[in-house]
Image: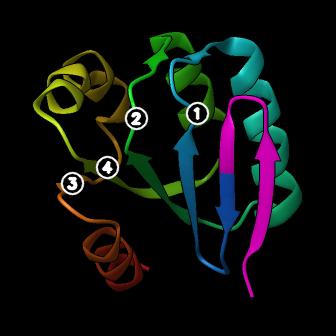
């Protein structure tokens, strides 16, 4: 059974080999939120590899430094990004350079992202 963690910046749903993150509408995900996020990842995965699924159903902003902190501080094996709008897809351009050592793929649904993440693991 997944563990659900609600934070002011969004919800983390932690499964055995992957994590689904859904941000809250309009938040600014910065270094402070990244530190809290990393704390939850370490508490639940220790140093085990995991797939990260970013479920982008609402608009929010993310500081590229926060992205870098998460990638460098946790054992991400793959990244699946669920995009539901053109705006979400365009925002990926600023993040992708931080994911150069990790397989990244975009999806139109959460179900597709989970299926791919399970195959990667």
Mark 2 and mark 1: Cα distance apart in space: 7 Å
Q: Dividing the image into 4 quarters, which one contains the N terminus?
A: bottom right
Q: Where is residue 29 in the image (x, y as percent from the top left)?
A: 59, 19
9 or 70, nearer to the observer: 9
From the viewer's perspective, is 39 left or right of 24?
A: right
Of circles 4 and 1, the one toward us is 1
First in residue order: circle 2 vs circle 4: 2
Mark 4 and mark 1: Cα distance apart in space: 16 Å
The quadrant where residue 74 appears: top right
Query: Residues at badges 4 and 3 in contact (C-beta under 8 Å)?
Result: yes
Of circles 2 and 4, the one toward us is 2
User: Most prominent secondary structure in the magenta stretch?
Assistant: strand
Q: Which secondary structure, mark 4?
A: strand
Q: Is residue 4 magenta?
A: yes
Of circles 1 and 3, the one toward us is 1
Mark 2 and mark 4: Cα distance apart in space: 13 Å
Please give the residue where the numbered disc 4 appears in the rendered image.
81
First in residue order: circle 2 vs circle 1: 1
Mark 4 and mark 3: Cα distance apart in space: 6 Å
Please give the residue where the numbered disc 3 appears in the rendered image.
105
Q: Where is residue 72 in the image (x, y as percent from the top left)?
A: 59, 32
Please give the residue where the numbered disc 1 appears in the rendered image.
24
């Amino acid at each position: 059974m997944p563990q659900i963690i609600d934070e002011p910046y969004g919800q983390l749903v932690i499964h055995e080999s992957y994590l689904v993150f859904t941000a809250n509408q309009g938040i600014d995900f910065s270094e402070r939120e990244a530190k809290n996020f990393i704390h939850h990842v370490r508490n639940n995965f220790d140093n085990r590899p995991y797939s990260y699924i970013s479920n982008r159903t609402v608009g929010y902003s993310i500081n590229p430094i926060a992205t870098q902190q998460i990638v460098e501080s946790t054992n991400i094996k793959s990244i699946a990004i669920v995009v539901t709008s053109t705006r979400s897809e365009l925002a990926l351009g600023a993040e992708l350079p931080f994911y150069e050592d990790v397989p990244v793929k975009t999806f139109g649904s959460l179900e597709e992202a989970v299926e791919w993440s399970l195959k990667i693991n």
